[in-house]
Amino acid sequence: MNEIYDVNEQGMFIECGTGAIYKHIEWIANERGYGTMHYPSSLTCSTVGGFLAHRGIGVVSTKYGKIDDMALQMEVVLPNGDIIETSPAPKHAAGPDLNQIFIGSEGTLGVITKAQMRIYDLPEERRFRGFLFKDMSSAFSASRELLQKFKPSVMRLYDPAETASLIKKIVGVEKPGAFMNIAYEGCKEMVEVEEKILLDTFKKYGAEDLGSEYGEKWWKEYGEEAMQILATLKVADGYVSSSDAIKIARDKLQMDYDEVNTSYNAAEGIWTVTLTKASGDDREIMKVTVDIYGNILDMVTVD
Ligand SMILES: Cc1cc2nc3c(=O)[nH]c(=O)nc-3n(C[C@H](O)[C@H](O)[C@H](O)COP(=O)(O)OP(=O)(O)OC[C@H]3O[C@@H](n4cnc5c(N)ncnc54)[C@H](O)[C@@H]3O)c2cc1C
């Protein structure tokens, strides 16, 4: 169920089996100059079906929307065994939108077996800008006004307490206040216009412009976080007796991977392995995860 059936550059979608890991369809899109624009933290470990079934959301959703905005058509197996296809017209005026009935239903109304997911041109330019607001209420007012003017791809606000802890630690903002990161992207001319609107709007609300440095760092750190791999396997007896998480740097990958293998040889129940890479090629860590799955499967017998 993880087949790629079609990369349709005319209709701007990828049609795939819903067992495909979302990161795989992102790679396929990227190879052709497109992106799925669905970038949740669980990108590398959740399936297309998992995201549809739980109505997932990613980090650039302010501009591109949630998974429910990205699904064009689906094939679903109903509880009585019937197989249906939702309308081939993504927007229509003929009755309920069946996609939206199955999206978010957590598998209770049917099994989604195939889906057409939107792809987008990779943006010619993606810019970041960090701001500090003196309080949350001025940040809310500024963002409300900005959203009436254009849709940034990222709009993330941290309250003063989180700015003083998380944001200070991760992106290095030392000053007090509420940190907001804005990203705006698309063709260069539009990005220029959006930047001017952004700066003019936020100035009215007394926001301190921190430039692009902190926002870019935030994106990089977010990307790293998004490389978390979660591998979970439930074995025959089905009770939890071990759950573990490790953090590793890339150069320690092999060593820690070996340690994971050793410790998990003795375990039973549900295994959870979380790997966070510090830098490097995300395909490498994906490969390690697939190996871990393979090794765990070798260790257990599921009746
Ligand atoms: C570390 C971490 C970070 C996360 N970050 C985000 C995030 O940023 N944004 C976000 O939106 N979510 C996030 N999640 C949640 C995660 O993406 C969802 O729980 C997702 O549903 C998991 O997908 P899965 O493929 O593992 O599905 P499962 O966990 O196997 O299934 C999830 C649910 O979907 C149903 N389901 C799965 N496949 C199908 C199908 N083909 N047809 C019908 N029903 C189906 C299952 O019955 C179940 O109810 C995160 C999770 C983790 C662990």
Image (cartoon, rainbow, N blue to C red):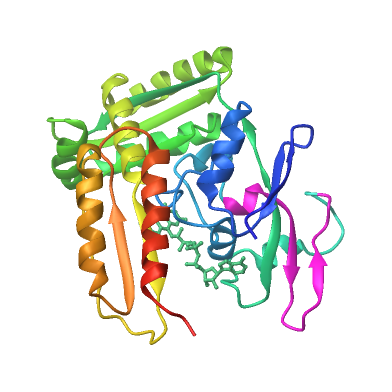
Nearest the eye: 204 or 92: 92
Nearest the eye: 158 or 39: 39
Q: Is residue 89 above or below residue 33?
A: below
Q: Is residue 139 above or below residue 51?
A: above
Q: Residue at x 81, y 68 (%)?
A: 84
Q: Residue at x 44, y 43 (%)?
A: 59
- Quadrant (top left/top right/bottom left/bottom right) for the N terminus: bottom right
Question: Residue 163 at x, y = what percent?
Answer: 19, 40
Question: Residue 176 at x, y = what percent?
Answer: 14, 35
Question: Residue 133 at x, y = what percent?
Answer: 26, 33
Q: Residue at x 47, y 31 (%)?
A: 146
Residue 271 relative to residue 98: left or right: left
Q: Residue at x 25, y 46 (%)?
A: 254
Q: Is residue 68 magenta?
A: yes
Residue 18 relative to residue 289: left or right: right
Question: Residue 167 at x, y = what percent?
Answer: 20, 38
Q: Is residue 135 magenta?
A: no
Q: Is residue 214 visible?
A: yes
Residue 85 relative to residue 32: left or right: right
Furthest residue to the right?
A: 94
Furthest residue to the front?
A: 298
Q: Which residues are magenta?
A: 67-89
Q: Is residue 73 above or below residue 196?
A: below
Q: Is residue 245 visible?
A: no
Nearest the eye: 161 or 270: 270
Residue 78 relative to residue 161: left or right: right
